[in-house]
């Protein structure tokens, strides 16, 4: 039995129920006059049906139980968590601090995951920020947020 | 004659200095993406999509198309030299390509891959030119029922041909369909699952989703592991295959090209699947099947020609019907829309410069790739030495700036990060992103054509079976569904029989 599938099925069922209720609220209409909720209605039903099928297949499957943690065994998932948190903080501070400062902080964290020597880390981060600023802001004219450093 | 004139017109567009430059950039980037494991053409096109906003629509599509077929060339380099496929369509090339390299025949392997790709890509383009115009003319007769049925066929194919669980692929397709409905209703303008957020009124946006699922999600997955592929320390010589190599590989090239040619056109087919089929066929027809997996040159020639032929012909349904047959072209379809161009039967008439310019640019691009891939192999090998700890942060930065640059809005960045997390979790839970993105891109067309068909027929589904083209598409879809049910039941029966044997 794949615990991963059972957990994901629970999430999908929740989504299917929400979408189903939304479609009813929007109005399903009739076959000769489909409403805005028509495709949502049928999609949620089929989605729930196949999710149910997945659950049944898992319960009937003659496999050894696969634990949820097995997907994360022996891999550096901590790196992923660090990066996700960094990205969330990055989006929160980008417009306030500006591209240069926010990206410098982000690159220090991202390059830091690679366990470089401190001077290599700082030079790589600064170089990346400066080069990317020239490529995107100056050359490609992407309007990056200025923030506290106004250039 | 008219086609020849149109092609010459296309060359006049493609040979303009700026478009020539975009072909070059696209093919170089495509080769680079193909060489580097971890980032495929979907991720690259998604990431670079926002960068094309400042370009003309023709230049943008030329460049993005170059990335697509360029990646097919580049992927073989890592497959042969490192035994790590640069991208999914090069997985099969590892089997014999790396073995040839171990036997000191890396040069002929790389050479036959490059020449085979060029020949097959050129033949695919000839097919594209021959078929495109008549198909466009035929497509003008398509109505909502035909479009609905063909899109349904596309959904059925992509789930039938999924590598993992078909049930999960179907679920992803429905999820993509649900996501595509977010926004204002195209007919009544009702808000659907927008949560009152203004940014969602026009839907979620294909670029942040694609960048998240295939770019950021891929980076997250790669951050967990350290690549252990060692570059083969061998002198690469004799890049031109010998006469014997050509004699051995010639029929593999022909068969691979034919397989790729037809698989590229089919919705859900494409370069990846064509390589597996081409290799399987080659092994089956060979007089010495035992040599496959041990350095058979046919094992390199067949998949490499298949993937390049498929890469060319997969543009046929996109350009003529407006239906992307695989996930890479689904993202390219998004690029067309962002540039205000609607692919489909009117594309030849409304944008002949773009249509013929892109096709002609693919000829030029194929020639550039042959030149780039052979003499520059030592350079591509050096690129492989860029440590992941530098590469992935840079890819992430590219994604972030690209997403922000779409609409100068943090909303797209947030969407991309959310889908990046989802893409990572999908990989962990064994769900594929390809059916989701294909269903997402085709969802609006699917819904509009379904509703219009039902309005036309006053609610009767017989409209889909009384029209011949839609009937054929529905029959093929049903056959695929029935076949998969039989396969599933046979598998269940086999699983039950095993304890009996014991």
Image: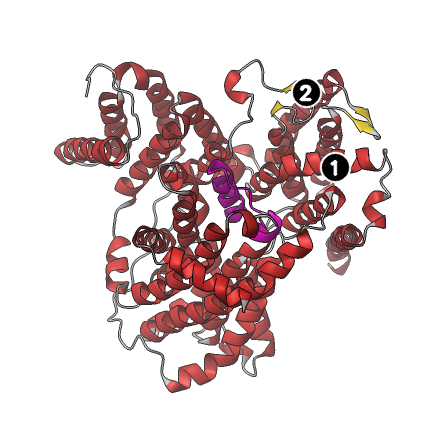
Q: Quadrant of the N terminus of chain B?
A: bottom right
Quadrant of residue B102 in the image?
Answer: bottom left
Q: In which quarter of the image is the C terminus of chain B?
A: bottom right
Residue range highlighted in magenta: B318-343
Q: Mark 1 points at which residue?
A: B450
Is residue B143 on the magenta stretch?
no
Res B465 visible: yes
Q: Residues within 10 Å of mark 2 (few under 14, many from 20)?
A: few
Name which residue lies at 43% across and 47% down: B61
Helix, strand or loop under label 2: helix
The picture places residue A95, in percent across and down from the top left corner, at 31, 17
| Distance CA(mark 2)–CA(mark 1) | 23 Å
Estimate the x, y position of residue B498 in percent, counting from the top left.
Answer: 73, 57
Write down the residue under mark 2. Answer: A18
**Residue B85 seen in the current view:** no
Label 1 resides on the chain identified as: B
Relative to B323, is A125 above or below? above
């Amino acid at each position: 039995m794949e615990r991963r599938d059972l957990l994901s099925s629970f999430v999908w069922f929740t989504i299917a129920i929400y979408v189903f209720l939304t479609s009813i609220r929007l109005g399903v209409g009739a076959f000769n006059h489909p409403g805005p909720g028509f495709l949502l209605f049928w999609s949620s039903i089929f989605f729930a049906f196949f999710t149910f099928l997945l659950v049944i297949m898992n319960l009937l499957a003659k496999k050894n139980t696969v634990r949820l943690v097995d997907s994360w065994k022996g891999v550096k998932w901590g790196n992923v968590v660090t990066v996700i948190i960094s990205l969330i903080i990055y989006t929160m501070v980008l417009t306030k601090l500006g591209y240069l400062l926010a990206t410098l902080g982000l690159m220090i964290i991202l390059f830091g995951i690679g366990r470089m020597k401190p001077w290599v880390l700082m030079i790589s981060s600064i170089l990346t920020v400066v080069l990317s600023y020239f490529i995107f802001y100056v050359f490609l004219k992407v309007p990056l947020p200025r923030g506290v450093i106004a250039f | 004659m008219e086609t020849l004139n149109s092609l010459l017109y296309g060359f006049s567009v493609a040979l303009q200095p700026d478009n020539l430059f975009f072909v070059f950039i696209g093919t170089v980037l495509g080769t680079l993406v193909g060489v580097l494991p971890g980032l495929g053409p979907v991720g690259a096109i998604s990431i670079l999509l926002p960068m094309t906003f400042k370009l003309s629509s023709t230049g943008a599509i030329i460049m993005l198309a170059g990335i697509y077929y360029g990646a097919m060339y580049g992927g073989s380099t890592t497959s042969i030299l490192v035994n790590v496929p640069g991208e999914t369509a090069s997985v099969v090339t590892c089997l014999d390509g790396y073995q040839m390299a171990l036997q000191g025949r890396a040069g002929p392997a790389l050479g036959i891959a490059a020449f085979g790709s060029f020949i097959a890509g050129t033949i695919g383009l000839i097919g594209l030119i021959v078929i495109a115009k008549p198909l466009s003319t035929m497509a003008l007769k398509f109505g909502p029922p035909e479009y609905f049925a063909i899109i349904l066929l596309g959904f059925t194919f992509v789930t039938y041909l999924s590598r993992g669980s078909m049930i999960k692929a179907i679920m992803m397709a429905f999820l993509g369909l649900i996501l595509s409905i977010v926004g204002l209703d195209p007919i009544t303008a009702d808000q659907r699952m927008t949560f009152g957020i203004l940014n969602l009124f026009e839907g979620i946006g294909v670029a942040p989703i694609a960048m998240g699922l295939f770019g950021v999600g891929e980076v997250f997955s790669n951050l967990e592991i350290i690549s252990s592929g060692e570059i083969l320390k061998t002198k690469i010589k004799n890049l031109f295959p010998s006469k014997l190599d050509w004699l051995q590989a010639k029929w593999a090239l022909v068969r691979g090209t034919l397989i790729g040619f037809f698989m590229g056109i089919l919705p859900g087919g494409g370069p990846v699947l064509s390589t597996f089929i081409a290799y399987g066929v080659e092994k089956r027809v060979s007089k010495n099947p035992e040599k496959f997996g041990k350095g058979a040159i046919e094992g390199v020639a067949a998949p490499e020609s298949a993937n390049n032929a498929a890469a060319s012909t997969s543009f046929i349904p996109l350009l003529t019907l407006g239906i992307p047959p695989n996930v890479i072209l689904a993202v390219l379809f998004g690029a067309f829309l962002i540039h205000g161009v609607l692919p489909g039967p009117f594309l030849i008439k409304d944008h002949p410069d773009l249509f013929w310019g892109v096709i002609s640019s693919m000829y030029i691009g194929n020639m550039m790739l042959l030149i780039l891939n052979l003499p520059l192999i030592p350079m591509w090998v050096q690129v492989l030495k860029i440590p992941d700890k530098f590469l992935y942060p840079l890819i992430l930065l590219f994604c972030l700036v690209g997403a922000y640059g779409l609409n100068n809005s943090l909303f797209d960045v947030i969407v991309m990060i959310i889908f990046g997390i989802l893409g990572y979790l999908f990989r962990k839970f064994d769900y594929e992103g390809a059916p989701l993105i294909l269903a997402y891109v085709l969802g609006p067309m699917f819904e509009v054509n379904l509703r219009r068909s039902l309005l036309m027929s006053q609610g009767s589904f017989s409209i889909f079976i009384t029209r011949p083209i839609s009937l054929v598409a529905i029959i093929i879809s049903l056959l695929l569904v029935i076949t998969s049910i039989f396969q599933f039941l046979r598998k269940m029966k086999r699983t039950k029989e095993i304890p009996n044997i014991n």
